Image (cartoon, rainbow, N blue to C red):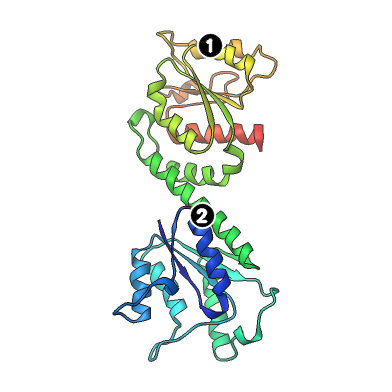
Amino acid sequence: MKIFLSSTYRDLIEYRAAGAEALERLGQQGIRMEVFGARPTDAMEACFDEIAESDALVGIYAHRYGHIPEGQATSITEQEFDFARSKSKPVFCFLIDDEQAWPPKHIDGEPSGTALRSFKSRLQSQVVTEIVSTPHDFAFKIASSVGRFLLTRKVKEALDQAPSASMGSSELGNFQAARRAARLAHVVAGAQVLLVNDVPEQMNYVISLMEQLGIDVTIESTSDAALASLTSKRFDAVISDMERFGVQDEGIRFLTRLRKLPSAPPVIFTVGTYRPDLGTPTYAFGITNRVDECLNLLFDALERARG
């Protein structure tokens, strides 16, 4: 993914370098004007071309408003923000902490100071901004913000590719589950989940999603094998099908046996056809036939176990 780094230049050289390195560590391509090279277009047009071809914009703003091209009313830096928004690009905006020591030569007087304050006020009214102090702090917060965005997009794209209507999800449900996956990444990563299914290939899609989130998935096809795993290893949650090997209530029978263990993890049931009128089986954590709901139930269980 290409991410355009927007800011004034001379006052933020170290911050721009730290931000670009943070993006590269995330495996993304940071686009900066200082590495454009010679071009036949003027600087502003070159920046707009790069923003148009980028997937997102990261802006960092300190105490300089920036150059205002002749005959125009706003600085190139502010125009970059507006152009990215006009192209519906995700925008991540960071403001230098007012308490951070700053060279006086890089602090605008008037009338630029008023223009800068107006621009910052507009930023804070249109997007969620974050305060940063040092270049290291900026790099850390870029990695966190953009990392969450990338994970959300990755999960959302995976959910949108649900292989069948029976395990499909709603558009809103996919978005909410994806955002929650990113928010709970630190809780979910490293979780131990036992999947019990007599045809585990049918759950490959869900297994892949869990593994992308850093969840360790153990697969068993029978109740006996699943119970043996539960006695030899600690699991944070169990995802079980309801019908196995032609026995329609095998999941319930499995749950009854599981509850006799000293510390039984929560059990989430997956079914081909969900019957809301039947409710959730007694002692089960939840039941669903949708991927987004399955993920949300799993997140609920993991928050309780690991949060």
Is 234 situated left or right of 161 in this image?
right
Position of residue 80 relative to residue 185, above or below, is below
- Judging by the rendered image, the residue that carries numbered circle 1 is 225
Disc 2, SS: helix
Which label's residue is closer to the chain start, 2 or 1?
2
- Crowdedness of circle 2 by 10 Å Cα count: few (<14), some, many (20+)? few
Residue 5 % position (x, y): 47, 68
Quarter placement of the C terminus: top right
Is 144 situated left or right of 162 in this image?
right
- Crowdedness of circle 1 by 10 Å Cα count: few (<14), some, many (20+)? few
Residue 295 % position (x, y): 50, 34
Is 148 situated left or right of 53 in this image?
right
Query: Residue drawn 61% across and 39% down?
Result: 187
Residue 174 % position (x, y): 43, 42
**Residue 199 in view (yes/no):** yes
Q: Amino acid at mark 1?
A: Ala
- Judging by the rendered image, the residue that carries numbered circle 2 is 25
Which residue of the protein is positioned furthest toward the left in this rendering? Answer: 40
Image quadrant where residue 231 sits? top right
Q: Amino acid at mark 2?
A: Arg
Closer to the camera: disc 2 or disc 1?
A: 2
Query: Residue drawn 65% across and 82% down?
Result: 103
- The CA distance from mark 2 to mark 1 is 42 Å
Disc 1, SS: helix
